Image: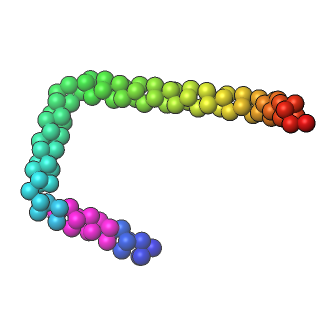
Amino acid sequence: MGKDNKLVKGIVIGALVGAAVSLFDKNTRQGVIQSGKTLGLKVKEYAKQPSKLTSEVKQKIDNVRQTVQEVSDDITFINEKVQELKESSPHVVHMLQETKDKFIP
């Protein structure tokens, strides 16, 4: 169990060092500052209007649900087409063999 603790500790320290080093870049620093400001504004907005957060989360869930349904429908359609191909393939092979036999005695 001690090795696990050292691993987790090493990962956390490595992540923190990596984040600190990345902040030496001016663009990265500015991006982090801007993201922090945007996050702060959103938190304040949601604190004032919790129903807005609930509404946005419900909308995201509905979007994901709709996307999953569309993917499911697409998979069903593809599966049906594969089954049709499986069923029609022997018939097509037989027709091709007959045609070949007619033209090549």
State which quadrant residue 100 falls in.
top right
Which quadrant is home to the N terminus? Answer: bottom left
- Range shown magenta: 10-20
Q: Is residue 14 above or below residue 52?
A: below
Residue 93 vs residue 48, the one in the foreground = 93
**Extreme-bottom residue of the structure:** 2
User: Is residue 73 shown left or right of residue 39?
Assistant: right
Q: Residue at x 84, y 32 (%)?
A: 103
Residue 35: percent from left, percent from top: 16, 44
Q: Residue at x 40, y 27 (%)?
A: 63
Above or below, comparing residue 33 to residue 89 in the picture: below
Residue 42: x and y, percent?
A: 18, 34
Q: Is residue 10 above or below residue 40?
A: below
Q: Nearer the viewer, residue 2 or 87?
A: 87
Q: Position of residue 10 (x, y in %)?
A: 31, 71
Horizontal placement of 104 versus 32: left or right? right
> Which residue is pictured at 72% across the width and 28% down the height?
84
- Residue at image point 46% right, 25% down: 66
Residue 76 drawn at (x, y percent) = 62, 28
Of residues 91 and 59, the one drawn nearer to the viewer in this rendering: 91
